[in-house]
Amino acid sequence: MTAPSSELDSHLAVDRGPDTLLTEVVSKSPMRLAVARFRKDKLSMVSLVVVVLFFLLAISAPILVAADLIDPLKNDTDLLDEYGLPLGSFGGISGDHWLGVEPGGGRDALARLWYGTTFSLSIAIAATIIAMFIGVVAGIVSGAAGGWVDAIIGRAIDLTLAFPQTLMLLALSAVGLAFVEEILGVPRGNPAAAVYVVGVLGLFGWTAVARIVRGQVLSLREREFVQASQMIGASRFRIYFREILPNLWAPILVTFTLMMPAFVSAEAALSFLGVGISAPTPTLGNILTDALRYADSAFLYFFFPALLIAIIVVSFNLLGDGLRDALDPKGHR
Amino acid sequence: MAESDQTVTEGTAAEEVPTVDEVLSQAHAASELDPDAPAVLTVSNLRMYFPVRSTGIIRRKVGDIQAVDGISLALPKGGSVGLVGESGCGKSTAGRAITRLYQPTAGSIEFEGRDLATISNRELKPLRREVQMIFQDPYSSLNPRHTVGSIVAAPLRIHNVVPKNQTLKRVQELLEVVGLNPEHYNRYPNEFSGGQRQRIGIARALALQPKVIVADEPVSALDVSIQAQVINLLQDLQREFDIAFLFIAHDLAVVRHFCPEIAVMYLGKIVEIGDRDSIYNNAHHPYTQALLSAVPDVKQAITGGRRERIQLTGDVPSPIDPPSGCRFRTRCPIAQEICSRHEPPLLQIGRRHKVACHFPGRLGEHPHAPLTAGLLGVDAEGRPDPGASPSSDLVEQPGYADTWFDLDKKSIGRA
């Protein structure tokens, strides 16, 4: 196929001019504008640094444990007095144990917190990914298909929200754990508990995502590019996940960062209630539960995990808020 | 860009901005009608109703928005038909029903022996290669998250038109055909101007080498000088690839230039259809006359002449509950009793000219007695006339017959 006539040649000549001609009229992409807005916000930048730091800590912990540089499991009763409390001031803080030692077992508090962060964040991320996956798929299908599909998914969301989750979680934990162990073949004990917690958090957490995504899709599906892809014969699947989905990354990213801290604290709450990973494997939740017994006698052992959870929750939330402000310039603060 | 620089240098302020007429006159010649071209797409009695439902749990259907209510037209091979009308008259809906973005309520769309209106989605997919669409808004018709290359390649991939390793080559060819730099395939739409984006949309429509393109106001979102370039491009492509265009627009000057045949729509119906000369110089329907009188005419402004401006009063009636009889009667300056009783048939009054009016005539020369009364078998007020015999062949047909109703002789004429 060749250019039909000299008219086209003149168009080509214009458009093929020096490249500067085009770059002059290039507008900044929404992405670059969002990054610029985000960078201007100091609080968001600080929270981003903190969040990245936590991820680095979480990734480094298993490596350090494998390299024997930290050991969250080694008991050392020599560091405890006859009541099981740490020797020395401030919960046994020393050059070897920067955050003191655990009362009762004499394990290194820093090592346990560090390693526990890995488990807590892994559980939260896994649960968030499951919830996001279900929520995004349900939201896109619900918003784009409309009609009775939308009605059914909408009622499913209502039903899930109306469910007394925590009660069910506790009441069904025996059945649920048995299911995970027998049917899914996950080894007994902590692995099964982790799968159960992740599954339950994910299966109950998707509703918020689904609603947000559905709302966005309702406006996106009226854009002409959706009709254009229908016009070229694109399948439903392609329209949903190749055309609409890439336009949803902003709300998805924001929801992700806001959902993560909720699941970190949810994991802690579940551990406190006795569902979930139990000692000696540390998580922020079970460390905190354990520390509660020593809250008056070894306050620092209780204080550090509580502080850590608080920092994680606050920094993730601030990051999520900052992202939302940066990605949605029309939103008001 | 080149054309727009040649603005009129002196004169009043009105002349400094080039009008579409001027820009177009500096560009390609207007498209000419090929009277012998066979119809490639034939639309018969197409209806597109959208249900209106009540609020509440049981969403009972309470009515229909009669967006398109029985239009018929034939699209000649390699030719173009313009569809004009004011906002909300159903012209875009008609385009979307013809391309099956909507499932038509009734009627048929015949293309190569098959009826697009009733075909299943599975059977429709291969036919998507033949009938394509260019969209109105170049800012929302391109997915902002896809590169130009992947936008233009999408139809090629979906229909397996070219082998995978040649997709990029074909995309670059297409970009070149529409006058874009082929090296820009990995850029995102936001890096392009409105006119360039519209070219990308055209390249996407061309990718499947369609026989028919429905252009839904392809230039109304663009600057006047850019409009001319895009129109020129469409004309070049039409000649090169022999594509038939259904050109939907509200800009009468653009349509006049691009389309040798024009259909005027009002409230879901075609009120007048004919070749360029019949519509622009010889309009017989009062609505077409009002529409044409609203077009600004710079040449006339220069000479100081002042045209009679027909001002329609009132609003377009609701398409949920359109007026009885003729739909235009509520705003028509010459409406009479019969207009509320009977819907005027789309009567052929010239070789390539049809009009749906009981009193068809040139501006100021409308007849006083309804010409259609005899054909409908009613008297001048529209009451049933026992003595008259209604004509049987008033059913709306796409295309033109060899015989027509001669207004001067008031009888059936012949070519």
Image (spheres, coloured by chain):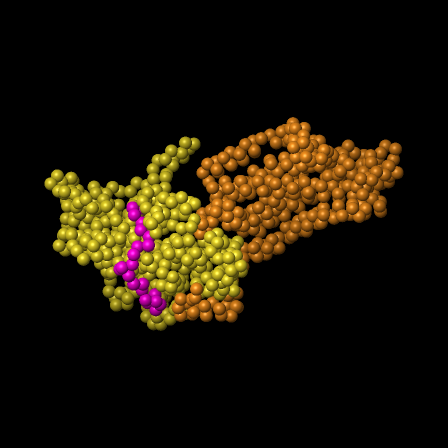
In this view, B297 is above or below B381: below
**Residue, x 46% and y 62% (percent of image)?**
B174
The answer to whether residue B391 shows anywhere in this view is yes
Viewer-closest of B113 and A268? B113
Query: Which quadrant does the N terminus of chain B fall into?
Result: bottom left
Residue A293 lies in magenta, yes or no?
A: no
Count of numbered labels shown in the rendering:
0
Q: Quadrant of residue A317?
A: top right
Viewer-closest of A301 and B396? B396
**Residue, x 48% and y 68% (percent of image)?**
A16
The answer to whether residue B19 shows anywhere in this view is no
Q: Which residues are magenta?
A: B24-46
Residue A32 drawn at (x, y percent): 57, 57
Left or right, A133 with respect to A302, comes to left
Left or right, B307 with respect to A175, comes to left
Viewer-closest of A186 and B248? A186
Left or right, B140 with respect to B412, comes to right
Query: Which quadrant does the C terminus of chain B fall into?
Result: bottom left
In the orientation shown, which residue stands out farthest toward the top?
A171
Letter of the chain in yellow = B
Letter of the chain in orange = A
Residue B70 drawn at (x, y percent): 29, 45
Residue B87 drawn at (x, y percent): 34, 51
In the orientation shown, which residue stands out farthest toward the left?
B387
Residue B44 lies in magenta, yes or no?
A: yes
